[in-house]
Image: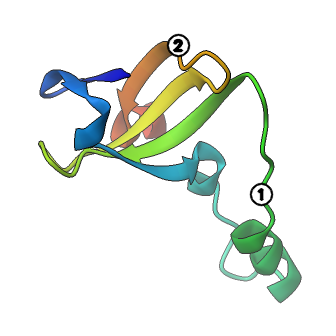
Amino acid sequence: MRLTCPICGARDRREFYYQGDASMLDRPAPADAPQVWADWLHLRDNPRGRTRELWYHEAGCTSWLVVERDTTTHEIFDVQLVEAQDAD
């Protein structure tokens, strides 16, 4: 599998580390109840099909990326910097 880093270009998957679902970017508010924080931290879906995931480009530019891919075929649909996601 190859990922196209917006900064470095196409690279082998071994340069990147999978960091979980991109929903982790949607943190609860600091004042939310402890159970909300516990759920956000510990409860994870394991979807099949098209997902949005966090990847870290450790062997390259050290950027955090949101990768949209299919978990069954590993087809990559989109790769964006996390900062670009904040602007949407």
Give the residue number, with chain letter if any, for mark 1: 44
Q: Which numbered disc covers residue 75? A: 2
Query: Residue at left 15%, top 28%?
Result: 7
- Which one is nearer the viewer's eye here, 87 or 77? 77
- Please give the name of the residue rendered at 75% of the width and 72% of the height, measured from the top-left corner: 42
* Placement of 79 over or under 65, stated as above or below: above
Residue type at mark 1 is Arg
Q: Is residue 55 visible?
A: yes
50 relative to 5 in the view: left or right: right
Where residue 79 is drawn, which disc sits there? Answer: none
Q: Residue 40 appears at what percent x and percent y?
A: 75, 67
Residue 85 on image: x %, y %: 46, 34
The count of marks equals 2
Q: Amino acid at mark 2?
A: Glu
Question: Is the residue marked by circle 1 packed among few (<14), some (14-19), or many (20+) residues within 10 Å?
Answer: few
The reply, left or right, for residue 19 in relation to residue 25 is left
Asked whether the viewer can see residue 88, the reply is no
| Residue at the outermost bottom position | 34
Q: Quadrant of residue 12?
A: top left
Q: Residue drawn at (78%, 29%), measured in percent from left and top?
A: 48
How far apart are the two marked residues, 1 and 2, measured between alpha carbons? 22 Å
Residue 4 appears left or right of 35: left
Q: Mark 1 and 2 residues: CB-CB less than 8 Å, in contact?
A: no
Q: Is 54 above or below relative to 84? A: below
Q: Secondary structure at mark 2?
A: loop
Point out the frontmost of discs 1 and 2.
Answer: 2
- Mark 2 Cα within 10 Å, few/some/many (few <14, many 20+)? some
Observer-nearest of 6 and 73: 73
**Which circle's residue, 1 or 2, is located before the other in the chain?**
1
Q: What is the quadrant of the N terminus in the image? A: top left
Side (left or right) of 61 relative to 65: left
